[in-house]
């Protein structure tokens, strides 16, 4: 101990051994779970000869709450009532045995941290416009800033009063950006399978995730535009499936203000072992990837590219991070990430034990099967109408004047365009229906000078992402078929140029589920 102290290192006073299952051990474990100033402890189990036969960790639940509070304050920029509500809700949702260990933390730290967060905003150290570098600086100076806060409010009554009553408003109000999960790793490490599994779990939980894959989103500009749309789209979570190998690749996110949890894939035996597994997966999956494939002739080139990517991989040094092994199964990785999102995310999520992991993995596997089945890009999924002449018979001729009639008719159920599928759950459902017939109920014909479309009833009869399922019949020159969505929207109900003709009850037509 003296030798360690001579170098200025902290040491722990040795404690007498305790026997497992005794009151002394229970007291030691309970005390560690309540500790405010450490992450936990590593316990060594010895036999009668003093030989260590087992090691295990005892975590501090207070430390976990402190970390959750730091993320709420720094990453999510919460303060005032929103912060107090977030932390109180977090406490209330914990199991009773954990909750009992947090009485000291709640009494000593909850009010203090709410005031500390207010002080950061009152003094301008943190605002809604604080960039990623500023947030990283707050995280690095977490302890120092608390010392400054304590001294400041003790010396300045005006600041103390401001801190006690502060609530954000205007530009300083908290935003509703989604919790982001950013994947980091080379091709074949399992990012896409994990991302789809996590997406499916979040959907099961009744949440609104968004999955963005740069491989199919297009170039850099299209990729960043997709992220911005997701931020504005009311989603609870944003999953970014991209290699993100170095700081330069992740700099794009700095200006977007993402609240990101980073998941990094590696291998405990080093880069070569990581590349071996990734290469084997890339080789075996064949066409189950749009942009990165290999065959026997290209094996050496692909392996070298994987090695280059793995060598360049540099995990971020700031912010929440989980490192997982490429050898871990997807379910285990999903559980670890779920636990971290539960601890630091802005959105409350249920216990993962209440969800169907097998079903979520099934969604991920179905997406890969889809890519094998359709190696060329698919633009949309649809219900193809079997008898187009019957459809035209339902439309008054005057509604077609001056318009170009479609050559074939269908109901779009999932539009992909140039993007990757953002809804793997819906894709799985539609793949399962491929080739099957369905009888559709047609309700009305809507028309204006720009277009004509038939509304299709959908009260759970078929899976569809479209709020207004329809058949586009005709459009004026220069008007795209997608205009039918606008034509059928309720906001156009009072448009004097819009005509709606109800079809007789029971008007039905047959279609087949297809991909185009």
Image: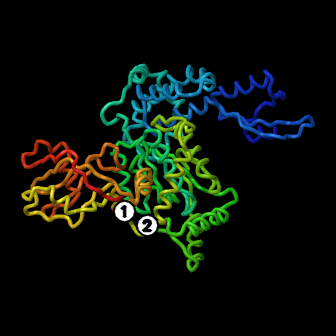
Q: For residue 421, what is the image quadrant?
A: bottom left
From the viewer's perspective, tell me whether residue 199 is left or right of residue 218. Answer: right
Is 305 drawn above or below residue 149 in the view shown? Answer: below
Residue drawn at point x = 20 percent, y = 64 percent: 406
Residue that sits furthest to the front in the current view: 506
Is 200 drawn above or below residue 301 in the view shown? Answer: above
Q: Secondary structure at mark 1?
A: strand
Q: For residue 161, what is the image quadrant?
A: top left
* Residue occupied by mark 2: 374
Q: Quadrant of the C terminus?
A: bottom left
For the residue pair 262 and 211, the one nearer the viewer reads as: 211
* Residue occupied by mark 1: 515
Percent x, y for residue 182?
Answer: 49, 51
From the viewer's perspective, tell me whether residue 406 is left or right of residue 516. Answer: left
Q: Residues within 10 Å of mark 2 (few under 14, many from 20)?
A: some
Residue 108 in view here? yes
Residue that sits furthest to the bottom in the current view: 297
Q: Residues within 10 Å of mark 1 (few under 14, many from 20)?
A: some
Q: For residue 177, what is the image quadrant?
A: top left
Question: Disc 1, disc 2: CB below 8 Å?
Answer: yes
Q: Secondary structure at mark 2?
A: loop
Residue drawn at point x = 82 percent, y = 36 percent: 45
Is 498 drawn above or below residue 293 in the view shown? Answer: above
Residue 134 in view here? no
Q: Quadrant of the N terminus?
A: top right
Percent x, y for residue 309?
Answer: 55, 65
Percent x, y for residue 175?
Answer: 36, 38
Determine which of the numbered discs, if any, sits on residue 303 in the image. Answer: none
Which sits earlier in the primary sequence, circle 1 or circle 2? Answer: 2
Is 74 drawn above or below residue 475 in the view shown? Answer: above
């Amino acid at each position: 101990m003296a030798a360690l102290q001579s170098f200025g290192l902290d040491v722990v006073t040795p404690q007498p051994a305790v026997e497992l299952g005794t009151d002394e051990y229970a007291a030691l474990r309970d005390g560690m779970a309540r500790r405010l100033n450490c992450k936990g402890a590593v316990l060594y189990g010895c036999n009668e000869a003093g030989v260590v036969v087992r090691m295990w960790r005892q975590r501090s639940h207070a430390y976990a709450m402190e970390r959750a509070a730091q993320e709420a304050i720094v990453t999510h920029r919460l303060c005032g009532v929103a912060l107090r509500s977030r932390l109180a809700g977090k406490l209330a949702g914990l199991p009773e045995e954990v909750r009992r260990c947090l009485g000291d933390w709640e009494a000593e730290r909850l009010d203090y941290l709410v005031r500390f967060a207010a002080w950061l905003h009152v003094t301008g150290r943190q605002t809604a416009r604080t960039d990623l570098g500023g947030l990283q600086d707050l995280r690095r100076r977490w302890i120092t800033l608390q010392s400054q806060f304590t001294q400041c409010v003790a010396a300045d009554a005006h600041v103390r009063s401001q801190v006690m009553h502060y609530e954000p408003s205007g530009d300083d109000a908290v935003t509703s950006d989604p919790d982001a999960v950013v994947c980091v790793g080379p091709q074949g490490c399992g990012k896409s399978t994990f991302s789809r599994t996590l997406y499916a779990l979040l959907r099961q939980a009744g949440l609104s995730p968004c999955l963005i894959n740069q491989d199919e989103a297009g170039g850099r500009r299209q990729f960043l535009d997709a992220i911005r749309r997701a931020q504005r789209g009311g989603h609870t979570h944003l999953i970014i499936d991209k290699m993100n190998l170095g700081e330069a690749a992740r700099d794009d996110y700095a200006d977007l203000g993402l609240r990101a949890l980073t998941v990094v894939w590696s291998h405990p035996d080093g880069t070569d072992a990581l590349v071996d597994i990734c290469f084997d997966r890339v080789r075996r999956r064949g066409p189950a990837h749009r942009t990165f494939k290999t065959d026997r002739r290209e094996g050496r080139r692909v392996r070298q590219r994987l090695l280059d990517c793995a060598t360049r991989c540099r995990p971020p040094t700031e912010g929440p991070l989980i490192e997982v092994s490429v050898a871990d199964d997807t379910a285990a990785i999903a559980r670890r990430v779920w636990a971290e999102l539960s601890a630091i995310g802005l959105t409350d999520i249920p216990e993962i034990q209440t969800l169907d992991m097998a079903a979520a993995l099934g969604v991920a596997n179905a997406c890969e099967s889809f890519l094998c089945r359709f190696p060329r890009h698919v633009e949309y999924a649809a219900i193809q109408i079997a008898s187009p002449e019957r459809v035209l018979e339902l439309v008054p001729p005057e509604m077609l004047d001056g318009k170009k009639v479609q050559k074939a008719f269908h109901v779009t159920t999932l539009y992909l365009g140039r993007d990757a599928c953002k809804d793997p759950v819906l894709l799985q459902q539609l793949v399962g229906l491929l080739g099957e017939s369905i009888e559709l109920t047609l309700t009305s014909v809507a028309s204006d000078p720009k277009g004509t479309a038939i509304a299709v009833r959908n009260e759970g009869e078929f899976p569809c992402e479209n709020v207004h399922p329809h058949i586009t019949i005709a459009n004026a020159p220069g008007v795209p078929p997608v205009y039918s969505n606008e034509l059928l929207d309720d906001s156009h109900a009072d448009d004097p140029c819009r005509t709606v003709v109800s079809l007789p009850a029971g008007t039905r037509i047959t279609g087949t589920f297809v991909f185009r």
